[in-house]
Image (spheres, grey):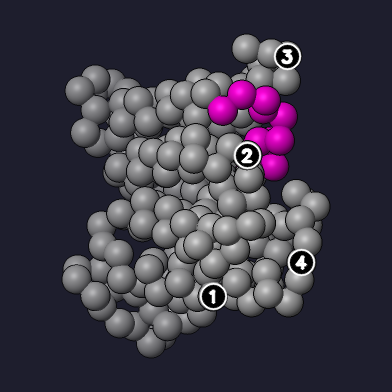
């Protein structure tokens, strides 16, 4: 593990620890807000990833341990004293989140902007769709057992697209007309997938399908 990898792992762990303190302690009286703030703000890990120099360290030291940690603080934890996060409604959502991050970090280590596409669509896009959709959603629709709103889905698209553009600017990638068009369709796909996916599984389907869709549409980028 080289120096930059150590810095990357340290920054990720410290950042997530601070988020957990804020969301589980400071905001414990507001479980829904706490859950969504954690969901959104974890996405900023995208901007820490350039520190890493080793694929295995990023995927299996920085990301994969959170699969175990988030499971242990979920309602399904075998250690019930650790499952306090379930009170904020996390369920297995954070576990799926960590699985997605691990897969994308390993597969697209050499193209971190593709990792960013999936993570930001999931964190900011889905997060703001949930918060603002619950507040302003008047026109609802239901697929499977989950009720969503047209307003929430619209907010997801309008949040995801500019965040994906910011992601490309951060990684100094070219923003050609073709790339912007590809990001438009990826944002639309992520929105549709979020609307169709039940039971928190969107933390798997949205990031993975968004990243793979961009990789397919722009394989040389």
Residue shown at 38%/87% (left/top)? 139
CB under 8 Å between callouts 3 and 2?
A: no
Distance in Å between CA atoms under marks 4 and 3: 32 Å
Residue shown at 61%/69% (left/top)? 183
Q: Earlier in the sequence, mark 4 or mark 3?
A: 3
- Foreground disc of the pair 3, 2: 2
Q: Which residue is mark 1?
A: 185
Q: Which residue is mark 2?
A: 110
Residue shown at 64%/77% (left/top)? 181
Q: Earlier in the sequence, mark 3 or mark 2?
A: 3
Q: Which residues are magenta?
A: 46-55
Q: Earlier in the sequence, mark 1 or mark 4?
A: 4
Distance in Å between CA atoms under marks 2 and 4: 19 Å
Badge 1 crowding class, 10 Å Cα cut-off, few under 14, some 14 to 19, many 20 or more, is some
Distance in Å between CA atoms under marks 1 and 4: 15 Å
Depth check, front residue: 127 or 1: 1
Q: Which residue is mark 4?
A: 175
**Residue 52 among magenta residues:** yes
Depth check, front residue: 33 or 70: 70
Q: In the picture shown, does residue 116 fall above or below 186? A: above
Distance in Å between CA atoms under marks 1 and 3: 38 Å
Q: Which residue is mark 3?
A: 3
The percent position of residue 146, horizontal first and vertical second, equals 26, 68
Residue shown at 50%/75% (left/top)? 188
């Amino acid at each position: 593990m080289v120096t930059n990898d150590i810095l990357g792992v340290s920054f990720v762990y410290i950042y997530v620890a601070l988020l957990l303190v804020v969301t589980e302690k400071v905001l414990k009286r507001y479980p829904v807000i706490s859950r969504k703030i954690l969901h959104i703000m974890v996405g900023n890990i995208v901007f820490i990833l350039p520190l890493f120099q080793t694929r295995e360290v990023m995927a299996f030291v920085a990301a994969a341990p959170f699969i175990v940690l988030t499971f242990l603080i979920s309602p399904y934890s075998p250690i019930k004293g650790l499952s306090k996060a379930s009170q904020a409604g996390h369920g297995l959502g954070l576990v799926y989140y960590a699985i997605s991050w691990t897969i994308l970090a390993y597969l697209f280590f050499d193209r971190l902007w593709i990792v960013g596409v999936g993570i930001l669509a999931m964190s900011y896009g889905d997060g703001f769709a949930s918060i603002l959709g619950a507040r302003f959603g008047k026109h609802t629709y239901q697929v499977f057992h989950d009720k969503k709103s047209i307003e929430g889905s619209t907010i997801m698209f309008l949040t995801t697209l500019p965040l994906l553009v910011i992601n490309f600017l951060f990684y100094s990638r070219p923003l050609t007309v073709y790339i912007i068009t590809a990001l438009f369709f990826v944002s639309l796909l992520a929105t549709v997938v979020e609307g169709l996916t039940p039971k928190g599984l969107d933390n798997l389907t949205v990031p993975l399908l968004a990243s793979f869709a961009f990789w397919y549409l722009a394989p040389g980028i």
